[in-house]
Amino acid sequence: METATAMSKTVNAAFDEFLSNNVNLDGDKTKKAKGSRDWLFDQIALFRSDATFPVTVSEFNIPYGSFARKTKRRPLDDIDLMVGLHAQGATYWDSGGPITITVPAASNLVAFCNEYTNVLNSTKVINKFVSKFRDVPQYSKAETKRNGEAAVLSLLSYEWSFDVVPCFMTVVEWNGRNYYLIPNGAGNWKKTDPRMDRKRVQDINQNHDGNVLNVVRIIKFWNRRPTMPSMRSYLLETMILDYYSTRSSADKASQFIDLEIPRVLDYLSQSVYSQVNDPKNIQGNINDLPWDERVKISNRASADLQKALEARRLESAGDQKLSILKWQEVFGSEFPSYG
């Protein structure tokens, strides 16, 4: 059962309390998490001494995911990192579907190819990471496994797990871009570029005087409440950023988050029915929600929009108590009570 975590006399104080204690990551924990991530990068670099391990290239290492983009809400349960590998003369073929990588016979990557071929199997590469982590003394008692695209490392000493994704960097292609090739979860590879995602978040947030990140995180909290089907975090984040990318410089996001919530809920209630394009121009439409889930999400966003508007009306009328109670209907009892 959810329980209220704090009490506040004003709506603004309630939102500050809510963001600090229930939505945004704890600063000390974030610092510790970054340190543990960097230490893991350093440990993986030492795998170079193993001739059977793919050759790592630290320059291609990159943190990615919502933690790296500063859009992650509580709890801090996973940290994503991509580990660069040396292609050793390998080539890739992109025909619009899964990407295949072919490696030369002299490469130690041959050990990770499909049987009787020179086609690199991404699952075998991930499994090598999983087995290698067990050789690190500090990770010997950790739970290690493969989960789709990543090698997952869970340590008892941390609340979070690490999702480690091997990657290659492509050459610059005809369009002037290069890409990261990562496992597609089915043995082949696919393109991505977390640099573009991170820059997009930074640019849009800066254009709105730094007021967008809190909106993204608090709507992600709303998205995870058991009142509707949950959208994938990246899809929801993309939709919110799409909305703010269309706002003019004369209509910047307010520092008062309660002014932004109704506008975002209104946008989501409509845009959830529409195509959502991958901002990296790689995947195309990323809105793969079934129609019945879109309806439920839209209905919930519309219902909570009305509650948010009523909360705003009550606050404007000077009734802080009833306004806070109405916001609790939107965010649940973890939202502070009046008092």
Image: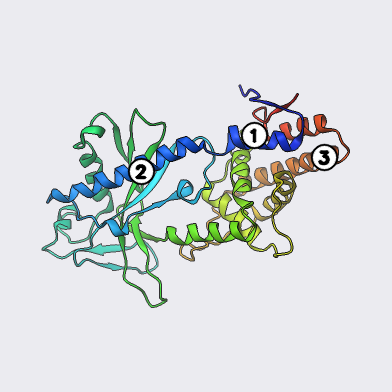
Q: Position of residue 19 (x, y in %)?
A: 62, 37
Q: Are marks 2 and 3 in contact (CB under 8 Å)?
A: no
Q: Residue at x 66, y 55 (%)?
A: 271
Quick check: 303 left or right of 225? right
Residue closest to the eye, 321 or 209: 209
Question: Residue flagged by tag 2: what amino acid is it?
Answer: Arg
Q: Residue at x 19, y 53 (%)?
A: 54
Q: Secondary structure at mark 3?
A: helix
Q: Nearer the viewer, mark 2 or mark 3?
A: 2
Question: Residue flagged by tag 1: what amino acid is it?
Answer: Phe
Q: Is residue 73 among what the camera can see?
A: yes
Label for residue 18?
Answer: 1
Residue closest to the eye, 6 or 167: 6
Q: Position of residue 311 (x, y in %)?
A: 80, 38
- Mark 2 vs mark 1: which is more N-terminal? 1
Question: Residue flagged by tag 3: what amino acid is it?
Answer: Glu
Q: Are marks 2 and 1 in contact (CB under 8 Å)?
A: no
Residue labelled with disc 2: 37
231 is higher (above) or lower (below) than 182: above
Residue labelled with disc 3: 310
Q: Residue at x 54, y 58 (%)?
A: 202
Q: Residue furthest bottom?
A: 174
- Mark 1 vs mark 3: which is more N-terminal? 1
Q: Secondary structure at mark 2?
A: helix
Q: Residue at x 43, y 58 (%)?
A: 194
Q: Residues within 10 Å of mark 2 (few under 14, many from 20)?
A: some
